[in-house]
Amino acid sequence: EAGVTQSPTHLIKTRGQQATLRCSPISGHTSVYWYQQALGLGLQFLLWYDEGEERNRGNFPPRFSGRQFPNYSSELNVNALELEDSALYLCASSFVGYYEQYFGPGTRLTVT
Amino acid sequence: AQTVTQSQPEMSVQEAETVTLSCTYDTSESDYYLFWYKQPPSRQMILVIRQEAYKQQNATENRFSVNFQKAAKSFSLKISDSQLGDAAMYFCAIWTGNQFYFGTGTSLTVIP
C-alpha cells in the first residue's frame, strides 16, 4: 500500500512569491492535514481538509490556504512568502477526523 | 487551549540501555488521546505508541512503553534495550478531536 506522498521534496522561493505544495493521501483516507515544522518549534497545525471542505484551521494568517480535490489529494498555497515561512511542511492523512494519522516525507520550503 | 511541553531538548543513551523521555500536557478536554511520534533523519514521522486518556493501563508496544499519569498530566516514554535505529527526534502529541498539538521534540542520540 502506497503511503502519503508529497511534492516537491525541496522548494526554493524568493520573498513575496507564492509557493504551492502538494499531497496525495493514502488510498481510502478522506482527511488531509497540513503542518508546519519550523526549526525548534515542533509541528504547528495549519489546516484540515475532508471531503473537499476545510474543517479546521490553525493559528496562521490567511495567506496560508489550500484546497482538497475530488480524489482527496490536497494543495497548500502560501502567498506573499516571508523569510519566516521557511520550514518543513508535513502532510498527513487519515480516515475522517480519526486520530491515527500517517505522515508524508515533507516538503522543505526555503524562502530567500 | 492545549499545550504540550517537552523539557528535554536532547537526550542520549548507551546502546542496550533504557531511556525515558518526558512530556507534560495541559488540556481542558475530558476526552483525548496522547501519542509519541518518532522522526528519524529521513524526516518521515512514525507513530511509536498511543494512549487513550480514559484507559488507566499504560500502553506498551514492544520495547516502548509509557507512564501515563493523568492527574499530573504527564506522559513519559520509556525505551528499553535501546538500539541504534532508535536515534531520532521524538515528539509528544495530544489529539483532542479536531487537531493535534505537538511538543517541540526531544532529540535522542544512541551511543554504540
Image (spheres, rainbow, N blue to C red):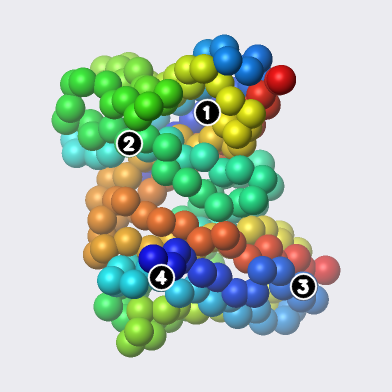
Q: Looking at the picture, does residue B37 appear above or below residue A84? A: above
Of residues A26 and A67, the one drawn nearer to the viewer in this rendering: A26
Give the labeled residue for mark 4: A25
Under circle 4, the secondary element is: loop
Element class at badge 3: strand
The residue that label 3 is drawn on is A12
Residue corresponding to mark 1: B6
Which amino acid, by three-letter code, is at mark 3? Ile
Q: Which of B30 and B66 is in front in this view?
A: B66
Q: Which mark is residue B85?
A: none
Camera-nearest label, 1 or 2: 2
Give how far apart the Cα atoms at labels 4 and 3 are. 24 Å
Label 1, secondary structure: give it: loop
Q: Quick one: label 4 or label 3, which is nearer the N terminus?
A: 3
Residue at the extreme top = B17
In the rendered image, residues at marks 1 and 2 fall on the same chain: yes
Total numbered labels: 4
What is the CA distance from the residue labelled 4 to the residue labelled 1?
A: 29 Å
Query: Which quadrant of the structure image shows residue B51?
Result: top left
Residue at 52% across, 17% down: B81
Alpha carbons under labels 3 and 2: distance apart: 36 Å
Q: Which chain carries label 3?
A: A
Q: Nearer the viewer, residue B1 or A27?
A: A27
- Secondary structure of the residue carrying tag 2 is strand
Q: Distance between the residues labelled 1 and 2?
A: 16 Å
Q: Which chain carries label 1?
A: B
Query: Residue A27 at what x, y percent from top left?
Result: 34, 72
Q: Residue B50 carries which label?
A: 2
